[in-house]
Amino acid sequence: MGDWLALSWKVLIVRGVLGIAFGLMALVWPDITVVALVVLFGIWALADGVTETLATFSSGISGTTRLLHGLMAVAGIVAGLFALLRPGMAATTLTWVLGIWLIVRAVAGVVEAFSGRSEGSRGMLFLGAGLDLVLGILFVANPGRAALGITWALGLVALVWGVVFIVTGFMVRNVAKHETAPPAVAA
């Protein structure tokens, strides 16, 4: 166990430093961070579209499954190219879609709050639905600013988690030191 602890504390501290670095960059350069995140999403979506294309033409599938893989391939390639070629518009579009999703969640939360089986949690469902509705309206009304807001939130979360990882790393290091230290000999 000592070997794992000796390695893990270093990994935790590196993760913490990377989290703090990302958090600071997101807070200092939110516009660049939004574009970078959209480009990364574009690369991922494009890669997903390519792998779905390969799955579409693999020999083990047919019929409806082949059609579904083909549709997912087209969607991935189109989304990936859109994000890579128009990252600003893609960020705005993704934020707008997120806003619509939050509004739909709010409506579903209110409906669930009125269902007979949620009497004990009705207040929390209303609270969650209210938060979803407010955020959804803000995202739909101002998708560009909302994208920057999401970047700020990610930056703050990354900073906090970075500090948590560093503190945890030092705590694990102390445990590893005590575990590997030779036992004290009584005189």
Image (cartoon, grey):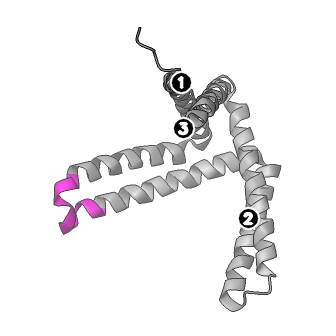
Q: Which mark is residue 5?
A: none
Q: What segment is highlighted magenta in the picture?
A: 111-122
The kind of secondary structure element at disc 2 is helix
- With 141 as the anchor, is 62 left or right in this view? right
How far is disc 2 from disc 3 in space, using C-alphas? 44 Å
Q: Quadrant of residue 135?
A: top left
- Can I make out residue 78 in this image? no
**Mark 2 = which residue?**
76
**Mark 3 = which residue?**
1
**Mark 1 = which residue?**
163
CB within 8 Å, label 1 to label 2 = no
- Of circles 2 and 3, the one toward us is 3
Q: Amino acid at mark 2?
A: Gly
How far is disc 3 from disc 1 in space, using C-alphas? 25 Å
- Which tag, 1 or 2, sits closer to the chain's start? 2
Residue 54 place in picture, x, y as percent: 81, 74
- Of circles 3 and 1, the one toward us is 3
Disc 3 crowd, CA 10 A, few/some/many (<14, 14-19, 20+): few
Q: Furthest-top residue in view?
A: 187
Q: Which of 116/169 is in front?
A: 169
The kind of secondary structure element at disc 1 is helix
- Can I make out residue 140 in this image? yes
CB within 8 Å, label 2 to label 3 = no
Disc 1 crowd, CA 10 A, few/some/many (<14, 14-19, 20+): some
**In this picture, is 98 found above or below 30?**
below
Residue 181 place in picture, x, y as percent: 53, 21
**In this picture, is 79 found above or below 21?**
below
